[in-house]
Amino acid sequence: MIYSHMGGFLSDCNTVTFSTLFEMPGEVSSGISWWLGFRRSKKDKKTAPSEEPRPYLHPEYSKAKVIDLDIREIVRLPTGFDVNEWVGSTTLSFFNNINILYSVLVNNYCSNESCPTMSAPNNVQYFWQDEKGKKAKCTAPQYIEYAMTYAERQFKDETVFPTKYGQVFPADFLAIIQRIDRYFFHMLAHIYNCHFLSLVEHDLHRHLNSTFTHFMQFCLEFDLLDPKETCVLDDLIEALQINQLETPAPAGSASGATAATGVAPEGGAAAVSTPSDSDRNKVADGHKSSKGGTSPEQ
């Protein structure tokens, strides 16, 4: 009975004009005004823009880098290189660089207590998804441990990253790289969102900016990340002028590239060496694993 009366009342409210509103008794008029105002306030609250502080956008910080060169020249496929070889070896370099940056944070800044969720700007939260598609909420250190463990397992798998001449790259190699790079982006988004000022204290923010610029430029060049994935850092991408690029070439069609054969060249994926390695800011092959839990993946 109460529901039917309320339904009739709300239905009548939809036909009330402003002229009849003022002719009604004060109690009814104020009630309708409150109800209409409540609906407007709820709608306005949903569309309110985020005003969370983003220190990484401050010009003093966003302009800080350790390299001053055209990143596009670094990420393009060198003449004579197999595209799978190039994409795989460069992804391994990102693994090392990002791991080194995070190792500064894991002991003193990023803990299960300080980062109970894997958060990113715009109130985005990442959930870990195992091989069976099951999602699980976890702390940032746990998520990062799972991600780095997954990446390391792929790098060590000879069927995924062949190291001997004549071995064939798997058909799903690019999909595996895209998944790894998606995890790397989540890590970088979390660092910018929660720990940027901690890196500023150690004067490492310029290294973070350089790594992020190199990483994003590379992913754009080979179409490795979905724009829907990277939109949480669109403001940073704009500030770093990463989006002011030429149209990225599809994988395997870069200027001077050889066709992707799917076969590891002599020396394999771990034996890449080019004259411009120093420009690419490559780090040592060894890595220090971040601390966290045990990966739930099977």
Image: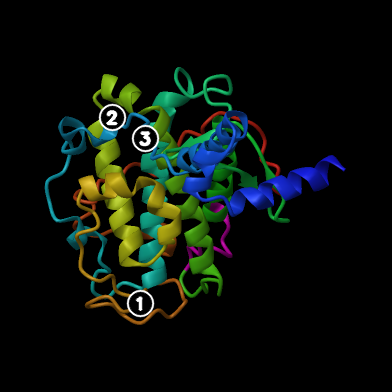
Q: Is residue 111 left or right of residue 272?
A: right
- Tell me the amino acid under the disc marked 3: Tyr
Pointers 2 and 3 in contact (CB under 8 A)?
no
In the image, residue 159 lies at what x, y percent?
Answer: 58, 65
What residue would you read off at disc 3? 192
The residue wearing badge 2 is 55
Between marks 1 and 2 in the image, the one whose residue lies nearer the viewer: 2
**Mark 1 closeness class: few <14, some 14–19, many ≥20 residues within 10 Å:** some
Q: Residue at x 36, y 56 (%)?
A: 90
Q: Percent from the top left, x then y, of residue 178?
A: 48, 60
Queried whether the magenta region covers residue 258, the answer comes back as: no
Element at label 3: helix
Q: Nearer the viewer, residue 274 or 49?
A: 49
In the image: residue 64, left or right of residue 169: left
The residues bearing labels 1 and 2 have C-alpha atoms spaced at a distance of 38 Å
Q: Tell me the magenta residue range.
A: 156-164
Three-letter amino acid code at disc 1?
Answer: Gly
SS state under label 1: loop
Q: Is the N terminus in the top left, top right, bottom left or bottom right quadrant? A: top right
Please state if 72 lies on the left or on the right of 197 as rendered.
Answer: left
Residue shown at 59% from the left, 31% from the top: 139
The one of 53 and 169 positioned closer to us in this rendering: 53
Q: Nearer the viewer, mark 2 or mark 3?
A: 2
Q: Which residue is mark 1?
A: 252
Q: Is residue 113 above or below residue 251?
A: above
Snapshot quadrant of residue 36: top right
